[in-house]
Image (cartoon, helix red, strand yellow):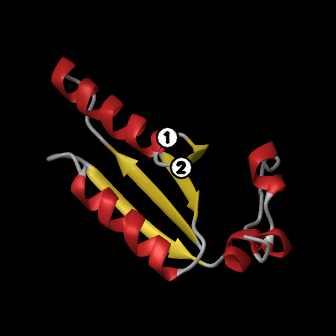
Amino acid sequence: MRIIVFFDLPVVRKRDRKIYAKFRRFLLNDGYDMVQYSVYSRLCNGTDMTNKHLKRLNEILPPRGSIRCLTITEKQYEEMRFLVGNPLIKERKVDTRQMSLF
């Protein structure tokens, strides 16, 4: 399974930029990879792990802005179409065949 986090946080004031940086740093430290600016994805091995990371995400939410989360299967993620550009190297490394090894 995959968790995809989409966010749009204010960065006008210095305090807002600190909150943005803290949230982004949390995502990176928690194993999320940047797909695009303000779109991060994390690979999870099953529903229990997905729920654990969703709970951790809910504990660190900033007070303002817009944050959305989508949980999809790895098969659904693989069917994503690239209209412009190519998959990142990190996206090519793991597929459903490799997930069964974990």
Which residue is most to the top? Answer: 14
Q: Position of residue 21 (x, y in %)?
A: 34, 29
Q: Position of residue 48 (x, y in %)?
A: 46, 79
13 or 95, which is in the foreground?
95
Label 2 is placed on what type of residue? Tyr
Query: Quarter holding the N terminus?
Result: bottom right
Asked which quadrant contains residue 8, the reply is: top left
Query: Quarter holding the C terminus?
Result: bottom right
20 displayed left or right of 43: left
Label 1 is placed on what type of residue? Leu
Secondary element type, mark 2: loop
Say if 37 sits above or below 94 in the image. above
Secondary element type, mark 1: helix
Say which mark, if any, is on residue 6: none
8 displayed left or right of 14: right
**Which residue was labeled with disc 1?**
28
Q: Where is residue 80 in the image (x, y as percent from the top left)?
A: 73, 68
50 or 83, which is in the foreground?
50
User: Going 17% across and 24% down the picture, which residue do you hit?
Assistant: 15
Say if 24 sits above or below 64 in the image. above
CA distance separating discs 1 and 2: 5 Å
Tally of numbered discs: 2
User: Going 27% across and 25% down the picture, which residue do you hit?
Assistant: 17
User: Going 59% across and 46% down the picture, which residue do you hit?
Assistant: 33
Q: Badge 1: how crowded within 10 Å, few (<14), some, or many (20+)?
A: some
User: Going 56% across and 58% down the picture, which residue do you hit?
Assistant: 42
The reply to whether discs 1 and 2 touch (Cβ–Cβ < 8 Å) is yes
67 displayed left or right of 32: left
78 or 65, which is in the foreground?
78
Asked which quadrant contains residue 75, the reply is: bottom right
Q: Position of residue 66 (x, y in %)?
A: 28, 53
Say which mark, if any, is on residue 32: 2
